Amino acid sequence: MIDKIKFYIENVRLKDDVLKDKFKRKPNSRNGNEVYLFDHFNSVFVKKNIDEVDNSPEDEEEAYIENVKHQNLYILYIRKIDTKVGKLIFHQNLRRNWINYIKLQFLRGFEGDFLSPTYDLKFNDFVKIIDLYANELNIPKNIFWNATITQLELGVNLKFDTRLKKDKKLVGTISMGKMLSCFGRLKNVEDKHSYGNHGICFKAKNFELSIYDKLKRIIKTKEIFKKSGERAKKNNQRKLSRVTFFLRYELRILSMSHFNQSAFKNRIGTLKQIKDNWNEILTVLYETTDDIEFYDFLSPEIETKLMKIGLESKGLEKFKDLMIYNGLKKIGYEDFKNFIVPLVNSKVRTKFESEILQVNSEFRDMSKYGNSYERKFLRALETKLNSLRIS
């Protein structure tokens, strides 16, 4: 559930041997401060230590790829010159960082697919990684867990099959682009960015809500197909997308101090609060969808039917009928009966109502499996979040 996270610990003392062995002092001090940067290359947990790299270009490239994935991430220690306490700042991606978890014998409790790029961190994973950081820097855990969080990413990866079947019968198909089409607006957020058929992002001042193609992202970051050329990557992505796709739902909090969503209050301010409120955070993350206005006017079955009609003829009748169906669904049958029908000339009133209800029945039967994109997304999100709960 947790990916990138930024937090700090004030007035903490790092032992001299930790600073000497695990940090590099930056040559230029600033504002009377000493600045130390964590040297992940010399950690016993690093994925590819510099000393293990041979002279082949391939090995050097692999080491480079593995170790710069956190290129904008860091662990800094800042203190006044001639003092012993300072401020420790972490900016890390908990799932995809410099750590080789296979090397950690005491972390065998991780799931077998933990290193998969589509894996979502579970509660025990989160706890063990934070404990690992505390142990690595020799900081008491009670101090480390009270670190103050300033930025946070909460999200999950949702897997969808592209072929929809009911009783082994194909009833429709879906794709990433079709799924993304159902996301309309986010309450009180005017800034919406669309990235073709690959993602959308609602951008507020202090947070962003993104829904995007996870497969495309992990190919770009070289988590899979690392040694493939660009053409091979596109072909592999196209083949995978024909049978399945991964949708990432992600809340990115850019400024915790200005994030005014009351449902998250006192639940994500410190590492300990996340640990103590894990299940509640999952619930609140799901409830963020309450602020999304979904464009739920298509289902995979209806879309498949209309695409077939569009290929076979230039007729527009069924497309007009779709607008009638959605109009009736929007206002409801009772309001249609009580306020629209009486406006029609009495001589054709019965015929008009009958034709409208016939259209409604036809499209309702087309979508009888309840596979609207909104429902499919919400069901998948709820199922994934429930799988991450602690019992």
Image (tube, helix red, strand yellow):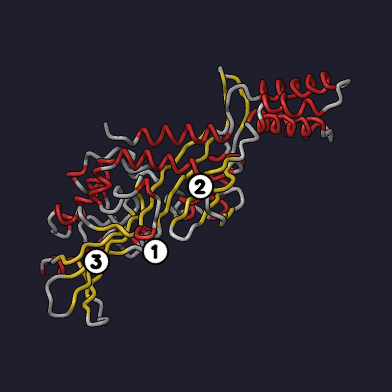
Task: Report the residue marked by disc 2.
Answer: 211
Q: Position of residue 98 (x, y in %)?
A: 30, 57
Task: Give the CA separation, mark 1 to mark 2.
Answer: 37 Å
| SS of the residue under disc 3 | strand
Instruction: Tell me if residue 162 comes above or below residue 254 in the rendering.
Output: above
Q: Nearer the viewer, residue 174 or 253?
A: 253
The structure residue drawn at horizontal position 30% and vertical position 64%, both measured from the top left corner, is 74
Q: Position of residue 329 (x, y in %)?
A: 66, 30
Q: Residues within 10 Å of mark 1 (few under 14, many from 20)?
A: few
Q: Position of residue 187 (x, y in %)?
A: 53, 48
**Horizontal arrangement in the rendering, residue 162 relative to residue 109 (left or right):** right
Task: Give the CA separation, mark 1 to mark 3.
Answer: 26 Å
Identify the mark at residue 357; answer none if there is no mark: none
| SS of the residue under disc 1 | helix
| SS of the residue under disc 2 | strand
The structure residue drawn at horizontal position 18% and vertical position 77%, both measured from the top left corner, is 80
Indicate which disc, 1 or 3, sits on the residue closer to the N terminus.
3
Instruction: Tell me if residue 126 comes above or below residue 60 in the rendering.
Output: above
Task: Report the residue marked by disc 3.
Answer: 38
